[in-house]
Amino acid sequence: MIVVCSACQARFQYDDSRFGQARTKRFKCPKCAHVFEVANPAVPAVPAPQALPAPIPAPSPAPPTRPLVMTAPLPEQDPVMEATLASARSTARRDRDSLLAAAGIQPGGLPAGLKFSLAFLTGPQASTVQVLERPLIVIGREEGDVITQDPETSRRHALLEIRADGSVWITDQDSTNGTQVNGERITGPVQLVSQQEFTCGNSTFMLLVRNTAEYPLH
């Protein structure tokens, strides 16, 4: 199923079998961090109980007339200002994570004792390696955390999720050319293991996971 953020209208794919028996599930938008709730499409909605007709109340004396007070309407939210503030918050959070990484402190959300990297095997960025310093990584042509500069990848192509248990999952973001794992185009979240390859457009990546306790940097 396609989940749409109620705040920024960002769309991302979710395997509806992960709802289980729950009637609803809370999501956190990877784009604007807004938390919203989505109903399980496999569970029918519970009909609201029909209320009994209320008795007709006896007429009451009319309340005394009060002077009309005019209130000014609330100002509408400026969408340009909201987008600017969201971009500033995202940039500040990214800068904070970079400072923590430079100081040797694990950024919030990443499991301790593990280091995650992406090696570019093919594409415009081939033979380079990028360290992953956030639990949610957007891969895109010219927008996101991993920039491919590959014309065959979409602007926001795929999403990598590093979970607290150390597992890494990849989800295609409705890209034009799709995301391939083991040579097959994925349609939902797929788990990746260390040294596994995946492709976005003409760019092929290898996920690298290192246990810093067993293999420390010298």
Image (cartoon, helix red, strand yellow):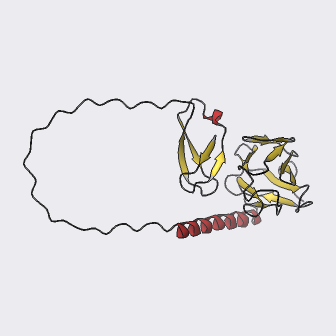
| 94 or 160, nearer to the observer | 160
Q: Is residue 23 above or below residue 146?
A: above
Left or right: 138 as drawn, with respect to 11 = right
Q: Quadrant of the C terminus?
A: bottom right
Left or right: 156 as drawn, with respect to 74 = right
**Residue 82: x and y, percent?**
54, 66
At x 34% / y 67%, what residue is drawn?
73
**Residue 173: x and y, percent?**
71, 50
Left or right: 142 as drawn, with respect to 183 = left
Residue 111 in view in this figure: no
At x 85% / y 45%, what residue is drawn?
194
Q: Quadrant of the N terminus?
A: top right
Outermost left residue: 61
Which picture quadrant has residue 86?
bottom right
Left or right: 1 as drawn, with respect to 160 = left
Which picture quadrant has residue 17?
top right
| 124 or 36, nearer to the observer | 124
Residue 74 in view in this figure: yes
| 139 or 191, nearer to the observer | 139
At x 56% / y 68%, what residue is drawn?
85
**Residue 37: x and y, percent?**
53, 44
Q: Is residue 205 above or below residue 128?
A: above
Q: Is residue 177 above or below residue 184?
A: below
